[in-house]
Image (tube, grey):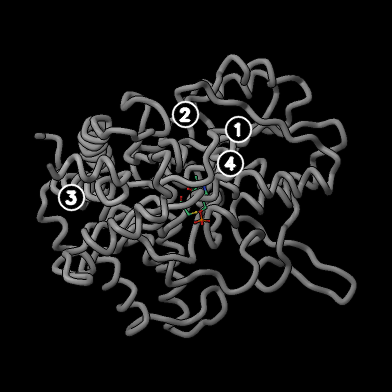
Amino acid sequence: MSALLPAALRDDFPILSGNVLDGHPLIFLDNAASTQRPRQVIDAIRNVYERDYANVHRGIHTLSERSTELYEHAREKVRAFIGAEHTREVIFTSGTTASINLVARSWGDANLQPGDEVLTTVMEHHSNLVPWQQMAERTGAVLRHVPITSDGRLDMQAFEELLTERTKLVAVSSVSNTLGTINPIDEITAKAHAAGALVLVDAAQSVPHMPIDVRAPDVDFLAFSGHKMLGPSGVGILYGKESLLDAMPPFLGGGSMINEVRLDGFTPAELPAKFEAGTPPIVPAIGMSAAIDYLNQIGIEAIHRHEQVLMQLAYDALSQVEGIKILGPTPKDRAGLISFSFDRIHAHEFAQVLNDQFGVAVRAGHHCTQPLHALLGITASTRASFYLYNQPEDIDRLVEGIAAVQKMFAPRGRRRKRKQ
Ligand code: C6P
């Protein structure tokens, strides 16, 4: 229990402290979808709008200079947080989805030909599948998928077999948003590089929760979102190695991404502006910077340890529940989320009762991993995902709620029997 963060952290989050929904204090266990924001982030956003806001890189007036400084300071904050070498390697996008699409469109269209292969996995979020399917349609390259083992880990033997001289890119998530599996990015990167392939990591579910250093294991591209790490929605990051980004053509065209425009053409701007066409997510980026300050203050290692305690508690408690099927691996290789299903009770019914009768917010559905759910032989699951402001009492409430839903949906005979 000593690895737990103080419960008082919750007081920093206005939406969590004292929020009562339909008569129940809110227990927020939907953090893998989006987290909540501490007062420090909300204040930072309000301060920009009240004191400093103007468009960036456009004016010589004081407010534009101030906004530009704050925006570029946010880029430096992100650079340091992920261990990148240069701020030129940090591109502000609207989120993980936009970051992966940028690589698929820009790097993919410029580098892939019929016969080339992109290797992804069956556990990917749709954001790391569909852009590659679209890329395959455009270029004639082939998309291959690493399967999973029966306990929800990547099948590394199959990975090695699928990795060939035709593989140009391995696109893989560091943590599965459905199984919770922590994938061995070090090993994947080393093997992919040895085979001559680049590596793109969908880090939407890892950057907010565990330490990251893009230079060890030396990934080529990394994508993540601000709203999953206490920051605002509408901002995300694409990290790319400078040499790769330099060689890639711009994706979106418009203001900011140019050096010079003539009627018959343009020359692109230097990095990172080359990939930031139009007015960027100015205030979301500044809010993300405040979120990074908050995470740094607590310490990302401490956050990871805290979530591991919660996940272990939840895993142990849920394992005792009759009829439950927990998706994914044992706690050893698992991040702070647990998805589960029952044969007779639909995930939506679970989530509805948990919300209405216990104030517990969880996600139910396919979590944007339809192919994975199909492989597991289910259409939906219920997912509880933890963050730094959750405490063991939240898990007690979840387990209590699950027992109540089970009772509610128990066959008539069994319900009568229990009452006797
Ligand atoms: N997963 C979830 O409930 P965006 O929406 O662009 O910020 O992130 C997309 C994304 C990409 N990869 C992974 C592994 C993700 O988990 C997500 C977002 C949310 O699981 C919303 S579907």
Left or right of 280, for residue 5: left
Residue 418 spot, x, y in % from top left: 17, 41
x and y percent of residue 387 in the render?
A: 27, 48
Give the SS element for disc 2. loop
Question: Residue drawn at (32%, 39%), measured in percent from left and top?
Answer: 336
What amino acid type should be assigned to the residue bearing mark 1?
Thr
Could you tell me if the residues under marks 1 and 2 are in contact, i.e. CB atoms within 8 Å?
Answer: yes
**Are discs 3 and 2 less than 8 Å apart at CB?**
no
Visible residue check, residue 305: no
Pick the residue in front: 195 or 268.
Answer: 195
Q: Of circles 3 and 4, which is in front?
A: 3
Separation of residues labelled 4 and 1 (CA atoms): 16 Å
The residue wearing badge 3 is 397
Of tags 3 and 2, the one toward the viewer is 3
Circle 2 residue: 183
Mark number displayed over residue 121? 1
The N terminus sits in image quarter: top left
Of the residues shown, which amino acid type is indicated by label 3? Arg
Q: Nearer the viewer, mark 1 or mark 2?
A: 1
Which mark, residue 221? 4
Residue 107 quadrant: top right
Among numbered discs 3 and 2, the one appearing first in the sequence: 2
Residue at image location 41% in from the left, 50% down from the top = 347
Do labels 4 and 1 touch, CB within 8 Å? no
For marks 4 and 2, give the one nearer the viewer. 2
| Relative depth, front residue between 335 and 48 | 335
- Element under label 4? strand
Mark-to-mark CA distance, 3 and 1: 34 Å
The Cα atoms of the two marked residues, 3 and 2, are separated by 30 Å
Q: CA distance from mark 4 to mark 2?
A: 16 Å
